[in-house]
Structure formats: structure tokens, C-alpha cells
Image (spheres, helix red, strand yellow):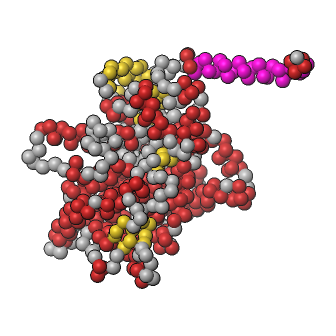
Amino acid sequence: MDAFLSILSRPSAGLIGVFTCLYFILGAIYRLYLCPVAHVPGPRLAALSFWYELYYDVVRKGRYGFRIQELHKQYGPVIRINPYEIHCIDPEFYDEVYVGNLVAGERRRTEKWEWSARMFGTTMAAVGTTSHELHRLRRAGLNPFFSKRSIAELEPVVQNVVDKACLQLERRGREGIGRGEQAGGVNLRDFFAAFSADLIGEVAFGEGYGLVDKEDFEPGWQKLMMDLSRSTHLMKQFPWAYQILTRIPERLVALVHPLTKKLFDIRHDTRTKIDETRRATDIESQGVARSKRVDYPHPTVLQSLLTNPHLPAHELKTPRLEDEAFTLLGAGTITTAHTLTAIVCHILANPFIQHRLESSLSMLFAHESNGPIESTLAGLESLQYLNAVVQEGLRLSFGVSHRLSRVNPDAPLHYHRNYAGKDYDFAIPAGTPVSMTQMFVHLDPNIYETPHSFKPERWLSTPNDTEQRRKELRKMKHYLVPFSRGTRMCVGMHLAYAELYLMVGALFRDGGVGRRMRLWKTDESDVECVHDFFNPSPRLDSKGVRVQIIDQADS
Ligand code: HEM
């Protein structure tokens, strides 16, 4: 009674309490019964609050994706996974969500949902841009550099970085043997992370980071990139925390949150590179005059953006370019590194596959002795078995493990199909974030038989294939979506393919260091995704993919 009287005697506090309760009660009623996606099935807790997702992704460490998979078994192919977002697990709906039909000869507008777009912390980069039109403009700035043709012209640059990295791998192996180390040991997870970062540095800024030259390939780099990737779950939920960190003096940040300090250091370095390129391309700080060009040893992404005549001045300001350049580093490093690590681990774990791959590469490079082949990349791409290995590697490394949400702002989506023997009919209102997870598409047993096994053979075709087999192959190819699809798909796809083909080719060709590698205290579970930190992560106690490089004489 006394407590009640004291609330009345302080009406402002009492009123605040009443309004707060009302706010939560009405909000809960709206989310559960009245909002546009209230009719979509799913757990009540997820419909009520983002904390359901927070629990699985932050407390249980990247497990919400796997929880979503279980929820689909309970609630069907289309479910509500948080107060606003719908998730679909039926691969047949993939193109509807990511590509859509042409409207008056144009691709339909595809937006990103602000809540998930901010998870990268780079809202001024193409990847964090929500609006369709602004994204189109930003992609138009990136596309010319990353086209298949431009990447083909860049082949000598990529090959150079591959050759240098393989030499260092060889050296590290020899040193280990020389020191009588148990391993001659190398951690491929760290090696590929160092290689892919050096490559992006070279291609984006004209200068690699020299990580492959560092002791043990600078393991801190891979860790940093994975830690950043892991923090994307927090960035979604608490974007203000990052904003606060950016306002604290850096020396203090180094004490409170060393990861953010490292992030700041990379960003400083990126800013310096932007300024240098800006000066070199003689663009005024406002980005107006673009007359004098400097001869670079090879084109770079920054140079291509800064000299793009179609980008307005505000798109060329340093903070925006910094976001874009930083995204390239984030998006192009761990994705490619994880794919390469998984591919090589599966090859080494399967002697039959390794033997078949090596024979096929030996045949290609045997032709080289009759005269150098014009393009190693084109030669490698023409090898059916290598193609099969790369496709299977991309299938089982998924690209990214997190669901990718898209918003169609103009028209509702309609899910009206039979799934697992039952009919479903859902209207998904325009403007609703809808997501799918490419990991589940790649592991669908109706598309890929024994989906968890690494079987390059599934991709092979022969002229005698039956019509049924051809149909199956077409279906498998259609649903291989590691780079996603539609207007928001990966811009770096052709570069990624060049890296994968050239690196696997260099490792397993005659005399390649990969032929002398043996897995050491490692098995395929070290590349199996059990945590979704946007990028796939194996079990947390995995030490990476460790190999011994044995002496030439023993091989
Ligand atoms: C095996 C390697 C790679 C895979 C599997 C991959 C996969 C993906 C996927 C699935 C997306 C869509 C993300 C989303 O919807 O939010 C994406 C976006 C992106 N990727 Fe990649 N990526 C790879 C390598 C690269 C490389 C080498 C680069 C560039 C240097 C790159 C640059 C980007 C950029 C800039 C975006 C954002 C595109 C946009 O929003 O318009 N990626 N990537």
C-alpha cells in the first residue's frame, strides 16, 4: 500500500511506468496478431523480440541458422524468424527472392533490410546500401573492374601473387624439415587467409600486405578477420555500440576493445592508400577534374573508382571509398580463404580425388612443353575434373553461411507450392525482408545426393549421359549459388574463380608443393561449418587445417 501511495505521490514516475507497460503490451499484441506478417508461422518468442535470435547467435555462438533449419521441420517451408523477417527453405523459391521477374525489361528493384545491412558496419559501401537505386550506382562503379574480361587481363597479377605465395609455402615447409620439426608444418587456414589478403591488397590498392612473408603467415590476420565476422551478429543488434567506440579516443579503445583498435588501424591504412591514389590520379579532393592519369603497373580498384566518369563527386569522398575498400578486404579475404582451405583439405583427405586431379593437371601442363600456353587460367578452366573439384568445394564451403535477406519494395511475393507433400499458400507483403540460406540449398538431398560428401564426380558429364542425368546436372548447376544471385550478388566472383583455379592448379601441378602435403592432426571436420559467423566457422576448438610438407625425396 505504501509503495502504491508513493507512486501516486510521484505521478511522473508512475505515469512513465504505466506508459512503458502499455507500450510493451500493445507492441506485443501488434507483433503477434496485427502486423503484416502475423499470419506466417514460427515461434512466438521470435515474433515478439529480436532477443530470440540474439540468444542463438550471440550466446550460443552463431547457431541461429541451424535453429532456423530445425524450425522449418516444425513449421513448414516459410517461417517468421524475428518480428519482421521471413525465412524460406525451399530452393525452388530462390530466384523469386533474389532475382525476380523482369518488369518492363528491367530487373525488379531489390533492396536490403537496414537491420541486416548494417551488420558489416559499412553502410556507405555497396554491400551495406539499402536503397536499390543507390546500390545500382555504387555497383556501376565496381562492375567494370570486376568483369570477366578485366579479370582475365589481370591474370598475370593474380598468377604472380599465387607463385610468390607457393614459394613461401615451399620455403616454410623446407625450414620445418631442416629444423627437424614434427611437421615441416603449415597451417593452411592461415596461409590462405594471408594469400587472399595479399591478393586483395595488390588488386585493390596496388600493394599487398606482405602477409605470406611473415612468420607462420601472420595467424593474427585470420583471427582478426574471423573475429570481425563474428561481431556482425552484435552489429545487427547493437549498432550504437560501434558508434560509441568510434567516438572514444583511440588509445582508450586499444585498452577497452583491442579488436576495434586493430580495425581502426586497417581503416587508417586504407585511408592513406585512398589519398595516395587520389593524388596519383590527380583528382581534386572534390573529385571533379579527372584528366591526368598515372601509369600504374596494373589497374587497381581504387584507381578504377576514382577515374570512373559516371560516379558523382559525393560518391568519391574518402569516407565512402574507405567503406568500399574495407568491404573488399573483408568480403574478398575470408570467403576465398575458407573455400581454398576446404577444397585442399578435401583433396588431401581423398587420395583417389587427389590422384585424378593431379593426372588431369599433368596432362594440361604437358602441352606447355610444346610451347607456353596462352592463358593458364583459360587452360585450367577447360579441365573438367578441376572444374568439378572447384564446384564441389564451393558447394560445401557455401560462400557465406548466414542467411541473406532481400526486400522487394514494390510487389508482394507469393509462395504457393507443394513442399514435402503438403500444399502451402502465403502472401508475403511488399517491403517484407525475406531471406534464404545458401548453405541449406547446397545441402538439399533432393538436389545433391549424399549432400555432406565431397564428391567432384557428381559434376562430371559424358556425351553418353541420359536425358535424366542431364536434367539432374542442370538442376545441380542451377542451385549452386555460393555467390548468391541477382543485382546484389558477389561482385568479386570472377576474381574469386581466378584465385581458386590458379592456386589449386599451382599446388597440384607437376612439382607443385600440394603434391607433397599430408594432413596432420586434421580431418574434414576442421572445415565443416558448425557456427555461422556470417562466414562459416568449424568447431571452435579446431586448430585449422594443418599439413606436413614432406621432403621431395620421400614423396
Ligand atoms: C569464394 C569466394 C567468394 C564468395 C563465395 C563470395 C560470396 C559473396 C556473397 C554470397 C555475397 C552477397 C552478400 C550479401 O548479399 O550481403 C557477396 C558480396 C560481395 N562480395 Fe563476394 N564472395 C567471394 C569473393 C569475393 C572477392 C574476391 C571479392 C572482391 C575482392 C568480393 C567482393 C564482394 C563485394 C564487394 C560484395 C558486395 C556486393 C554488393 O552488395 O553489391 N567477394 N560475396
Residue 394 to residue 195: above or below: above
**Which is nearer the eye, 440 or 209?**
440
Quadrant location of the N terminus? top right
Q: Say which residue appears at 55% left-offset and 43% top-offset.
A: 60
Residue 415 to residue 435: above or below: above
Q: Say which residue appears at 42% left-offset and 74% top-offset.
A: 183
Image check: 311 left or right of 474? right
- Residue 509 visible? The answer is yes
How many labels sit on residues? 0
Q: Is residue 11 magenta?
A: yes
Q: Is residue 533 magenta?
A: no
**Which is nearer the eye, 287 or 333?**
333
Image check: 3 left or right of 311? right
- Measured as percent of width and height from the top left, residue 204 is found at 46, 59
- Measured as percent of width and height from the top left, residue 494 is found at 34, 53
- Measured as percent of width and height from the top left, residue 461 is found at 16, 48
Residue 450 quadrant = top left
Residue 161 to residue 459: above or below: below
Q: Say which residue appears at 22% left-offset and 64% top-offset.
A: 355
Magenta residue span: 6-31
- Measured as percent of width and height from the top left, residue 266 is found at 58, 60
Main secondary-structure element of the magenta-colored stretch: helix
Residue 438 quadrant = top left
Quadrant location of the C terminus? bottom left
Q: Residue furthest left?
A: 464
**Which is nearer the eye, 485 or 153?**
485
Image check: 191 left or right of 120? left
Image check: 341 left or right of 371? right
